[in-house]
Amino acid sequence: HDLLKLTFGKLFGPSQHESPLIATVVLEIRLPRVLGALLVGGALSAAGAAYQGMFRNPLVSPDILGVSTGAGLGAVLGIFLSLPAAGIQALAFLLGLAAVAIVYAISSRLRGNDPVLVLVLAGVVIGSLVGALISLLKIIADPYDQLPAITFWLLGSLANIDAGDIKLALPVVLLSVLPLYLLRWRMNLLSLHDEESRALGADTTRLRIVFIAAATLMTSAVVAIGGMVGWVGLVMPHIARMLVGPEFGRLLPASMLLGAGFLLLVDNVARSITSSEIPLGIVTALIGAPFFLWLLAAGRRPWR
């Protein structure tokens, strides 16, 4: 309601009852938080849909190749070194990209009958190693100053997001979504087995590199500003696939819309259900895990 009043005020002139305090709260606190929830949720869902299509596996999420844990290590290291907020976000973004680069370099050096399986296993190994480093930093961090900030960041939060964060992350997300949408028909080919895809003229290796790079860039960008928010990139593409089918041209925008709306709802619940704000990752897990169990118990197969 306040946002609508301010919008009309900007268009047609401010009302005499308009409060400068309300304008400041809405435009500098509430609006960036709403935009941040939409951006983070949409990007994680888009990345989840891309990863699930690339790896032909509905259980894949955006952190399968270690991007989330790599970004988490960067943020934890930044907090441990007492860097400013911008430094923490930059380190999270860079280490998220570095983790995936290491995973891909390792998998390309290994020989195997199934290159996708080798890539996923390399991601699991690197993710486990990075998780151990995060645990080590949590143990040696200041338990009164640094540890609470580390724990809260690892569980995801939009409490400290501002317009500057949106301006940094939005171009990265848009530039990452663009190749996914332009190559949407090629993504449909990657959903087939590699032999079938190559028979239809698809360069599976090159396409997979492009899609992994795009999905990793957007994931690292939004994890850097919102922390590690789980389940969004796993569950929302499932729901989108149930609604619009597996065709990636429809699946990608549907996943983004559902993910954006879902995280906006979760953020409202997280900051209003108790007097102290609940991290987003807790709420998404409480909602996402039961839904996924229901999906398995009901025998639904939206992937096909």
Image: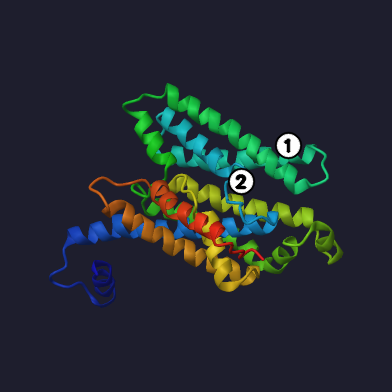
Identify the image quadrant of residue 199: bottom right
Looking at the picture, which amino acid does disc 2 mark? Ile
- Left or right: residue 201 compared with residue 127: right
- Judging by the rendered image, the residue that carries numbered circle 2 is 64
Image: 24 above or below 70: below
Q: Is the residue marked by circle 2 packed among few (<14), some (14-19), or many (20+) residues within 10 Å?
A: many
CA separation, marks 2 and 1? 15 Å
State the residue at coordinates (55%, 55%).
234
Label of residue 106 in the image: 1
Residue at the limit of the structure toward the left, as seen here: 17
Q: Is the residue marked by circle 1 packed among few (<14), some (14-19), or many (20+) residues within 10 Å?
A: some
Earlier sequence position, callout 2 versus callout 1: 2
Q: Name the colour scheme.
A: rainbow
Q: Nearer the viewer, residue 139 or 38?
A: 139
Q: Nearer the viewer, residue 115 or 239?
A: 239
- Residue 207 in the image: state x and y as whole percent: 74, 57
Identify the image quadrant of residue 147: top left
- Residue 68 in the image: state x and y as whole percent: 54, 43
Looking at the picture, which amino acid does disc 1 mark? Ile
Q: Nearer the viewer, mark 2 or mark 1?
A: 2
State the residue at coordinates (33%, 52%).
270
Marks 2 & 1, CB-CB < 8 Å contact: no
Is residue 45 in view?
Answer: no
State the residue at coordinates (43%, 48%).
226
- Residue 96 in the image: state x and y as whole percent: 57, 41
Q: Nearer the viewer, residue 54 or 241?
A: 241
Image: 260 above or below 133: below
